[in-house]
Image (tube, coloured by chain):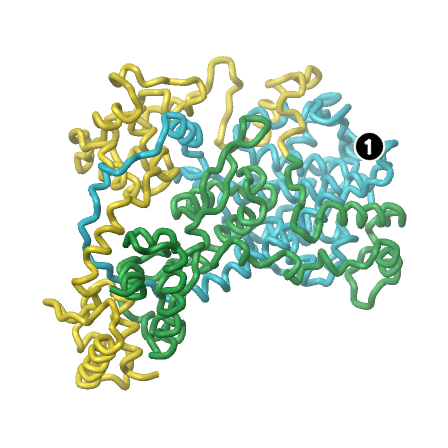
Chain colours: A cyan, B yellow, C green
Amino acid sequence: MNDGFLVVETERFHGPLDLLLHLIRTQDIDIFDIPISLITRQFLAAIQGMGDPGVDEAGEFLEMAAALVRIKARMLLPSPSGEEDHDPRAELVRRLLEYEMIHEVAHRLRSAENDRGRRFGKGYTEPRRRPHLAEAPLHVTWDDLLAAATRIEPPTEGEAEHRVTRRAVAMTEKVDLIVQAVRKVRRIEFASLVAPWRDRIHGVMTLLAGLELGRRRVVSLRQRQHFSPLWIYPGRGAGGSGDESMLSADEPEYSYAGAGEEAT
Amino acid sequence: MNDAGIVEAILFASDAPLSPGEIARADEALDEDRVEAALAVLTAEYDDSGRAFELREVADGVQLMTRPEFAPYLERFDTVPKQSRLSGPALEALAIVAYRQPISRIEIEYIRGVNSTGVIRTLLDRELIRAAGRGEGVGRPVLYATTERFMEHFGFPSMEHLPRPEELPVVLRERAPPEERAKDDEAPEAGSPEVSDEPLSPDEAVAAVLAHAGSEVGSDGEGGGSEE
Amino acid sequence: MNDAGIVEAILFASDAPLSPGEIARADEALDEDRVEAALAVLTAEYDDSGRAFELREVADGVQLMTRPEFAPYLERFDTVPKQSRLSGPALEALAIVAYRQPISRIEIEYIRGVNSTGVIRTLLDRELIRAAGRGEGVGRPVLYATTERFMEHFGFPSMEHLPRPEELPVVLRERAPPEERAKDDEAPEAGSPEVSDEPLSPDEAVAAVLAHAGSEVGSDGEGGGSEE
């Protein structure tokens, strides 16, 4: 199980795509045939090793993790008719390639910036009797001003200091929550599982936990169509065992360490 | 690299006059005498080749400056102002002052999320805003308001005539200072479920989840499954 | 007064690039052609006399700048203003705007995979990008484009000097046609990562991915990216 384990310095990366691309390129993986299971495990291990990232940053990495798990899930499911030719990885591949191109452009811009930084413009320019700026004709309409006003985005919470102190949300906690909830009721809606918390990260972690449990067939997830309610049902593996800790926080790969029916 | 080249590069790129001693720090091989010699070489070259600039000694050292006979051209060049538009950031700041005046720099920066010293300077130079008193609190910050020129330019007879269209962001429609507004945002809306950032014990969490929506009756999909 | 002298004086007194048209404002007798001719004269003179600065074409204009070989001497001077470097994330976002302009924040964030509010703010405030209108769709998002400052910051003579996507050594271009590629994939390479737990897709699916990626990620850099 440890064959795919890598030590990755997550702080070095500018985001989940950067990390993902790094995993793919450093291991010489064919980007057009990404082994999703392996990459997902490595990705999860890497983000678990993240020190104490900001909540937003963690959320972004976790969103990508969720997307990977979802791709994995889709690959396990028989494709619905009409979608047979569609590899669930296609959009990810497209994004990675586009990101890689941007990465290379950014690299070129950096070297242009370095070249430019070696040239210096005129440092001192003589004080001149510049025309009184207020007398200059001003070509600004009220519409320009309103357009600028509507662009103003109120300060986002992410920029506020207090965000930093919030605690991280452990996936084990969400796994336990789902397992306990489906033991008590026939089915539960995903929205109910996240309702007691305000933070997006709870939603992300709950979804991740749900997908992982679904993969392990501890629960099953059903959704009639895109954006319709997502329901979680007890799976064949839930209920019997007394072990409530389905995932151990120490497991680097989020592998299934609990009792119950091992699915794969 | 010859001495004169180094000295010229430094004088060209420096934004303040430099003494020969200071210039000499550019290279271990240089000293004041060699800098003085280089300055003499440069002066001669500029004179011989008829450059439009010259080396001039000022109080704190030497500086490269255009020769006085070119002053009329510079003046003429300056009479047509290059910039007759306001930048996007300046427009934003102006909108904030217009709708939230009197307002301090700190508050403008809070709303915009960035340092706004430069754009405020521009708006002051343009006489579109003015310092209109001082606020309460730490350092008694200067408060800015729009000017007569602002109203003339946009054709508003008075501040009461300032349009307040629907699409204005909330921070510009409300009159409350940012601190209060931020507090309001955190108050849970009436009827919304109790939300918490506090860690709930596992039992509490399960209870909260089950209590919230009931397990069987899902809402109509709002929020469900779209959290990703 | 000869043209070259006037043009030199104007350039010497400016700390930003000027277009020939702008320079021509300095004297009624000047026009763009005469300014261009004077610029050629100056370039030759600076080269011949070994000046420490040269004329550079930047941002659709010209500017006097020190030659790069003097950078080591200038970097250690407090009185020489240095251009501050952009952060990696800011460069990334800027690269996206440069190639995909006009582009919305949401699209930038989708391409980068991370929230970009902060870096867009930074780029706006440094006037490297500007709001250039509004897009279609929900909320009519603001679209961003690069500015003149963008070219100045990187020393690009014009936007045509941006690196072309087809010059980039990215996999996109040298992809084998789908059939060949799919065949290659079937032969496991030595040392390739263990993929046995992967339910192998049928060959058709692999070919479909390749075809899809090929159509979406054209070598001209026109990707999708607006799926969300």
Q: Residues within 10 Å of mark 1 (few under 14, many from 20)?
A: some
The chain containing the residue under callout 1 comes to A
The front one of A143 and B108 is A143
Q: Secondary structure at mark 1?
A: loop
Left-right relation of C156 to A123: right
Q: What is the x, y in percent for residue A38?
A: 74, 53
Specify the farthest residue to the left.
B59
Left-right relation of B180 to A110: left
Vertical comparison of B203 with C80: above or below: above
The front one of A134 and C192 is A134
Vertical comparison of B221 with A246: above or below: above
Name the residue rendered at 18%, 77% in the picture.
Answer: B20
Quadrant housing residue C140: top right
Q: What is the x, y in percent for residue B71?
A: 19, 58
Name the residue rendered at 64%, 37% in the picture.
Answer: C226
Residue located beneath label 1 in the image = A236
Q: Is residue A122 visible?
A: no
Q: What is the x, y in percent for residue B41?
A: 22, 82
Q: What is the x, y in percent for residue C84?
A: 38, 58
Where the C terminus of chain C falls, by quadrant?
Answer: top right
Kind of residue at badge 1: Arg
Q: Is residue B108 visible?
A: yes
The front one of C91 and A59 is C91
Vertical comparison of C227 with C25: above or below: above
Left-right relation of A192 to A69: left
Left-right relation of C48 to A260: left
Quadrant housing residue C176: bottom right
The front one of B13 and A13 is B13
Where the N terminus of chain C falls, by quadrant?
Answer: bottom left
Name the residue rendered at 36%, 65% in the picture.
Answer: C38
